[in-house]
Image: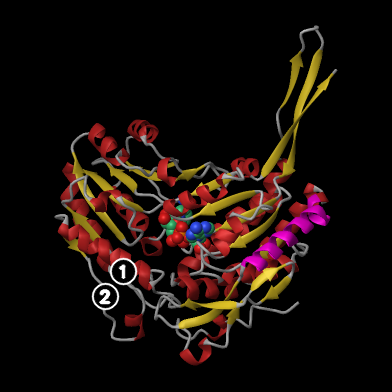
């Protein structure tokens, strides 16, 4: 097999960025039926830290998406679909090991593609990718199903039990903010349940999906079980995949409006969908909170990954008694962030993903002022005096003073930015926090456990943290309500989505 790890540019990364001479010799390929294949067209993979092109990406056309789906169907009907659960689980564990053995290569690829700090990719993205395979490999071995003894009208009985079967070929479409983590979060349970996959990673961050193919191969995953098609969404590989008649289900993470488009595309074929979408998440900080913990936790919740985590908090509600102190402390946190070269280990904030996304965030920075916000800190684009000025950095930003009706309080910005609002009563805080069309995550900060439980249960979201943020146990349900998604993944919820249950009723 052709080795990719050393043919992509990441081993020539020097001081956090790739030099222009290195740029055009690299290509990131599709992976179909165990082969790395070029596309008829290519698009550029850009380093968000300095705007240079780091690789050319092979764009899969409709025929190649069809080949990938065909390969996935054949693999499903061949060895993979009939492997025992134990064998499948063993190979998925080996994928985890193969990811770990490529740790540095995957970290560099992820950092160069996304611009996220190397410390974050090393701590979160790549370890979680390996953990995703391990967790679902273990879980599928233990996954039982209910059975029922049923009385019949003639006084006899029947036994009902269900068996778990693969759903089939799964189309996996993922975003750019946590590319390998979110892709493996879906691929691992899909494969654990015996499905095969065709993945369409974000056009902004194609590298690690292709690199994962090597790990799959080395772990003994048969050809055709894991396929990668690169491209854009509408009119490109994303749309070709969602509307392919032989794809049995779509699992998607991305923007709410893209989810809506995909729903339209799959409606006529009634494919099951699992959607993990956007958020406009709130945090409620009570005056009795452990102050420093709340500041540190919320600093992560606002600025981690340059605010590009679906779970990030963009609306902070703080009890009036500690409001001024809280705003001042969070301002100091924002000022202490070090936006640097992503590969520099001291960097704690990288650029945004693209020029287009930077323009969107800067638009909201301007809009916030027009809507009447007071700027506590930030609100602009930093100047470095080096190649980072060609990258897509923005300043970490805090606002106060906006009315709840402002667009900046309603729309997902997806940058290192929050607005802080004072509140006087629990009911008022809950009402403001819930006043959104989204419903992904919330966090509550208080030392009063009764209050913590009570308020947590009032939140109209899929995930509520109390005195923490982004503390994940992969067995728990993950997803949102409203514009934040459809369905839940995580633990048994993932296994249930990726399985077709066949209930068998035997008259005894
Ligand atoms: P996006 O919706 O623009 O793109 C996501 C993926 O969908 C990409 O691979 C893209 O090419 C593809 N796509 C776009 N249009 C398509 C179409 N018509 N048909 C098929 N595929 C199409 O999202 P993004 O900008 O990459 O990611 C950021 C968004 O993702 C934010 O809204 C964020 O909140 C959300 N997100 C949610 C979660 C979650 O778990 N809820 C996690 C991470 C990110």
| Residue 426 relative to residue 123: left or right | left
Image spot of residue 317 (x, y percent)? 25, 45
**How many residues crowd around disc 1 within 10 Å: few (fewer than 14), some, or many (20 or more)?**
some
Q: Dividing the picture into quarters, in which one does residue 369 lie?
A: bottom left
Q: Residue at x 74, y 67 (%)?
A: 33
Classify mark 2: residues with Cα within 10 Å, few (<14), some (14-19) or many (20+): some
Asked if residue 458 lies in the magenta stretch, the reply is no
Task: For mark 1, give the secondary structure.
Answer: helix
- Measuring from the top left, give residue 505's x and y in whole percent: 78, 24
- Magenta stretch: helix, strand or loop mostly: helix
Q: Which residue lies under the disc numbered 1?
A: 359
Which quarter of the figure is the N terminus placed in? bottom right
Closer to the camera in the image, 490 or 244: 244
Disc with the residue nearer the chain's start (1 vs 2): 1
Front tag of 1 and 2: 1
Coordinates of residue 204 in the picture (x, y in percent): 48, 70
Quadrant of the rendered image containing residue 287: top left
Q: Which residues are magenta?
A: 62-81
In front here: 284 or 265?
265
Residue 382, numbered label: 2
Where is residue 423 drawn, in percent x and y?
A: 20, 40
Q: Relative to 137, does residue 476 appear above or below in the rendering?
A: above
Q: Residue 497 vs residue 395: left or right? A: right
Task: Say whether marks 1 and 2 touch (CB < 8 Å).
Answer: no
Kindly identify the residue that appears in the image at 61 percent across and 77 percent down: 40
Q: Quadrant of the C terminus?
A: top right
Residue drawn at x 33%, y 73% is 393
The residue positioned farthest toward the bottom in the image shown: 21
Judge whether residue 71 is colored magenta: yes
């Amino acid at each position: 097999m052709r080795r990719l790890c050393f043919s992509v540019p990441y081993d020539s990364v020097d001081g956090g960025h790739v030099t222009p001479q290195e740029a055009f010799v690299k290509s990131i390929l599709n992976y179909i039926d165990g082969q790395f294949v070029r596309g008829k067209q290519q698009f550029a993979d850009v380093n968000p830290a300095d705007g240079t092109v780091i690789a050319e990406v092979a764009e899969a056309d409709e025929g190649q998406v069809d080949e990938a789906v065909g390969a996935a169907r054949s693999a499903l009907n061949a060895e993979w679909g009939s492997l025992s659960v134990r064998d499948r689980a063993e190979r998925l564990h080996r994928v985890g090991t193969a990811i770990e053995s490529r740790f540095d290569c995957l970290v560099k690829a992820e950092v160069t593609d996304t611009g996220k700090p190397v410390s974050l990719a090393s701590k979160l993205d790549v370890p979680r990718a390996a953990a995703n395979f391990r967790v679902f490999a273990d879980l599928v071995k233990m996954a039982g199903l209910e059975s029922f003894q049923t009385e019949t009208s003639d006084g006899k009985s029947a036994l009902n039990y269900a068996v778990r079967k693969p759903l089939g070929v799964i189309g996996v479409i993922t975003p750019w903010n946590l590319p390998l983590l979110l892709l493996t979060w879906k691929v691992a349970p899909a494969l654990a349940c015996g499905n095969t996959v065709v993945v369409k990673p974000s056009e902004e961050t194609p590298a690690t999906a292709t690199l994962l193919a090597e790990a799959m191969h080395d772990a003994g995953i048969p050809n055709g079980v894991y396929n990668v098609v690169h491209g854009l969404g509408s009119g490109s590989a994303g749309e070709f995949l969602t509307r392919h008649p032989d794809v049995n289900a779509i699992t998607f993470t991305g923007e709410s409006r893209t989810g809506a488009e995909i729903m339209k595309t799959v409606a006529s074929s009634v494919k099951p969908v699992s959607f993990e979408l956007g958020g406009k998440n709130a945090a409620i900080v009570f005056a009795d909170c452990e102050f420093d913990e709340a500041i540190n936790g919320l600093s992560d919740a606002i600025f981690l990954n340059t605010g590009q985590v679906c779970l990030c908090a963009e609306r902070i509600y703080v009890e009036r008694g500690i409001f001024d102190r809280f705003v001042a402390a969070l301002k100091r946190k924002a000022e202490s962030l070090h936006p640097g070269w992503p590969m520099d280990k001291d960097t704690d904030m990288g650029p945004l993903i693209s020029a287009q996304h930077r323009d969107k965030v800067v638009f909201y920075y301007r809009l916030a002022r027009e809507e009447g916000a007071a700027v506590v800190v930030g609100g602009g684009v930093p100047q470095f005096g080096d190649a980072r000025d060609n990258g897509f950095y923005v300043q970490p930003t805090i606002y106060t003073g906006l009315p709840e009706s402002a667009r900046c309080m309603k729309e997902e910005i997806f940058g290192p930015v929050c607005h802080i609002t004072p509140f006087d009563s629990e009911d008022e805080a809950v009402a403001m926090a819930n006043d959104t069309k989204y419903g992904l995550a919330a966090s509550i900060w208080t030392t009063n456990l009764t209050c913590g439980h009570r308020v947590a249960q009032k939140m109209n979201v899929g995930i509520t943290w109390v005195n923490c943020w982004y503390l994940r146990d992969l067995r728990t349900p993950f997803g949102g309500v409203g514009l934040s998604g459809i369905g839940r993944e995580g633990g048994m919820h993932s296994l249930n989505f990726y399985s077709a249950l066949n209930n068998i009723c035997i008259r005894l």
